[in-house]
Image (spheres, rainbow, N blue to C red):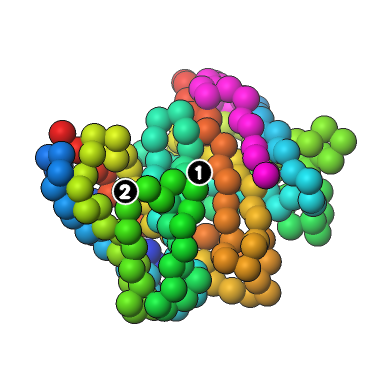
Amino acid sequence: AQSVTQLGSHVSVSEGALVLLRCNYSSSVPPYLFWYVQYPNQGLQLLLKYTSAATLVKGINGFEAEFKKSETSFHLTKPSAHMSDAAEYFCAVSEFTGGGNKLTFGTGTQLKVEL
Amino acid sequence: NAGVTQTPKFRVLKTGQSMTLLCAQDMNHEYMYWYRQDPGMGLRLIHYSVGEGTTAKGEVPDGYNVSRLKKQNFLLGLESAAPSQTSVYFCASSYIVRETPTDTQYFGPGTRLTVL
């Protein structure tokens, strides 16, 4: 079965600092990976997804993620944090079984941005 | 375009009561999903549907039933609520492009349910 592990349930950065949120995956087949963001009291919104077309994936709001097969990782980064980036971030791996696109989520990382 | 909407936003039930959560989407998506979100556990799939009139079990289906009588609606029912079902429930939908694992799921705003 496919799974993802997010290291660090809480990450705190200063405004303007680098954001690095870690995600490692486990999959017996080439994985399809997603990052979603959840702002307080809202649903999940897609940030970016890896579809095997390119290892460096650019998403919305200045975020990007790099797929590294050798490290089984798909870490999310942003060069300069903004206060509006404070949210919970979820990494997910996808499996299509003919019964829909089943997402398996990590446990989430709460990002706090401080002045 | 409202996207994915969920009704109600909040609900408090007593143990043993029943209720139905409604999910509606106006994007003509074939696939719809129900998840629950619990602290420290991410989102877990309860049930899903690949089209009108079809439903299937996900990872944590016990205690829930679903129906998809219309393409745009996906209902989640709790017949006899238990405190363990206290959670935030999210509905999602997705379109079919090439039936690949890269199809994006679009999420509703969630329903916060408390069972006393």
Tag shown at residue B63: 2
Q: Which residues are magenta?
A: A1-17
Q: What amino acid is found at the position of numbered circle 1 in the picture?
A: Val
Could you say where residue B23 lies in the image, as x and y percent from the top left? 32, 63
| Magenta span contains residue A14 | yes
Question: Residue at 30% across / 64% down in the picture?
Answer: B75
Q: Position of residue B18 (x, y in %)?
A: 17, 52
Q: In the image, is A100 to the left or to the right of B78? A: right
The front one of B17 and B44 is B17
- Residue, disc 1: A37
- Of the pair B63 and A101, the residue shown nearer to us: B63
| Residue B97, placed above or below residue A77 | below
Quarter of the figure with residue B19 = bottom left
At 63% from the left edge and 32% from the top edge, which residue is drawn? Answer: A5
Looking at the image, is mark 2 or mark 1 nearer the viewer? 2
Q: Residues within 10 Å of mark 2 (few under 14, many from 20)?
A: some
Q: Chain of mark 2?
A: B
Q: Are marks 2 and 1 on the same chain?
A: no
Three-letter code for the amino acid on which mark 2 is drawn: Gly
Q: Is residue A74 magenta?
A: no
The residue under the point 19% across, 38% down is B115
Helix, strand or loop status at disc 1: strand
Q: CA distance from mark 2 to mark 1?
A: 28 Å
Q: Quadrant of the N terminus of chain A?
A: top right
**Residue A48: percent from left, percent from top:** 63, 51
